Image (cartoon, grey):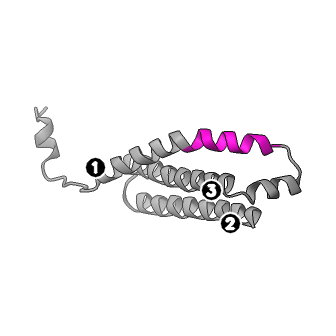
Amino acid sequence: MTFMTDRKRAVGLGSAKSGTAHHWQMTLSSVGLLILVPLFVFTFGPILGGSWEEVTAYYAQPLPAVIAGLTLAVGFLHFRNGCQVLIEDYTDGVARKALIVAVTCLSWGAAALGLLGIVRLAL
C-alpha cells in the first residue's frame, strides 16, 4: 500500500486547458435558459391547441419566433456541452471520441431542424 498525496497522483496527467472556458460556457447558457424558458412558456402557451392558420399567424410575429429560436439554439448548445462532460467522465479511448462526435452531430442537427421549422412557420 502506497501513501500518495492528491498532488502526486495528478503529476504527469496533464491539463485539459479548457476547463474554465467550458465552465463559463455552461454557466452562461444556464443563465440564458433561466431567462428564455419562462419566456418560451409564456409565448408558446397562448397558441397551444390552435389551428394551423392561427399558429402560422402567431409565429409570423417576430417576438414569439425569436424567443422560440433562441430557446432551441441555447438549449441544444447546453445539451451538447453537458453531454460532453458526461461522456468525458465515464468513457475512454475511441468510444469517447466517437460519442462526442455523435452527440455534437445530434445536437447541431436537432437545433438546425428546429430552427428550420420555426423559420418555415414564420414565413
Residue closer to the observer: 71 or 78: 71
Q: Are marks 1 and 3 in contact (CB under 8 Å)?
A: no
Q: Secondary structure at mark 1?
A: helix
Q: Secondary structure at mark 2?
A: helix
Q: Residues within 10 Å of mark 3 (few under 14, many from 20)?
A: some
Q: Residues within 10 Å of mark 1 (few under 14, many from 20)?
A: few
- The mark nearer the N terminus, 3 or 2, is 3
- Which residues are the magenta region? 36-48
- The mark nearer the N terminus, 1 or 3, is 1
Left/right of residue 40 with respect to residue 123 in the rendered view: left
Depth-wise, is mark 1 or mark 3 nearer the camera? 3
For residue 93, which quarter of the picture?
A: bottom left
- The mark nearer the N terminus, 1 or 2, is 1
Label 2, on which residue?
116
* Distance of label 1 from label 2 (alpha carbons): 33 Å
Split into 4 quadrants, where in the image is the N terminus? Answer: top left
Q: Residues within 10 Å of mark 2 (few under 14, many from 20)?
A: few
Q: What is the x, y in percent for residue 104?
A: 50, 61
